[in-house]
Amino acid sequence: MTTASQLHSHEIRDHILATGQRIMAGKGFSAVGLNEILTDAGVPKGSFYHYFSSKEAFGVAMLARYFDDYLTDLDSTLAQPDLTMAQRLMNYWQLWRETQSFSDCQGKCLAVKLGAEVADLSDSMRVTLQNGTSGIIARLAEALEAGVKEGSLVIDDKPSLVAESLYQLWVGASIMVKIVRHTGPFDSAMSMTQKIIRITAQ
């Protein structure tokens, strides 16, 4: 366990956020108190309030950090060299399937874990979630449009509508995976995705 004493001052804020993200991805937002996060992070409560005015402010910062990292990873996936855009998109959903496991998402499934909970608790966290998911959908829409233009895929509706539907499909599948405790819903989501995005022979 990394403690604050091992970090430079400019790293402490990120360390608190990373610790909170890991714990809350498993337990949820309301069930986790600040003391649990700070004890695990090795940070005194006074240091916490130097960076965050409240638990809600911490939640907003944690979600913003999560989406920044997520979008960076998504950009990398959608820019993989020597692949068609259709192949890059399918790699994205395959990666989703591998990293959004019900057993151990290691903080990668934070939006799925906290979405419904914090949207009802805090409007500022809800807006952060909305902005983050909108960024994901916008990137997927751009990728779908690029795939259509290059001829690697065919869709039957506007890229923005298809992207929104696909994202919602996979978020729903992630919730069902947590309920049924197996990855069958991801198999169904992948099958439906392949029907919605018809990949052409290259």
Image (cartoon, rainbow, N blue to C red):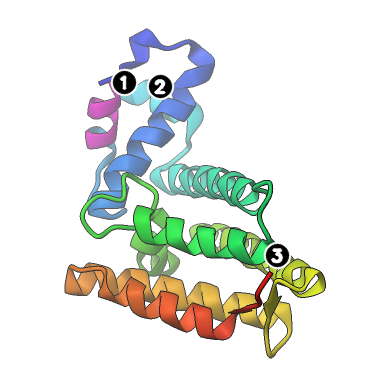
Q: Are marks 2 and 1 in contact (CB under 8 Å)?
A: yes
Q: Residue at horizontal 24%, vertical 34%?
A: 35
> Is residue 24 rendered magenta in the image?
no
Amino acid at the residue labelled 2 = Ser
Residue pointed to by mark 2: 47
Distance in Å between CA atoms under marks 2 and 1: 5 Å
Q: Up-down: is 79 above or below 85? A: above
Amino acid at the residue labelled 1 = Pro
The N terminus - image quarter = top left
Q: Are marks 3 and 2 in contact (CB under 8 Å)?
A: no
The range drawn in magenta is: 36-44
Q: Residue at horizontal 46%, vertical 44%?
A: 62
Residue pointed to by mark 1: 44
Category of crowding for the residue at label 2, using alpha-carbon neighbours closer than 10 angstroms: few (below 14), some (14–19), many (at least 20): some
Of marks 1 and 3, which one's residue comes earlier in the chain?
1
Tag nearer the camera, 3 or 2: 3
> Is residue 37 rendered magenta in the image?
yes
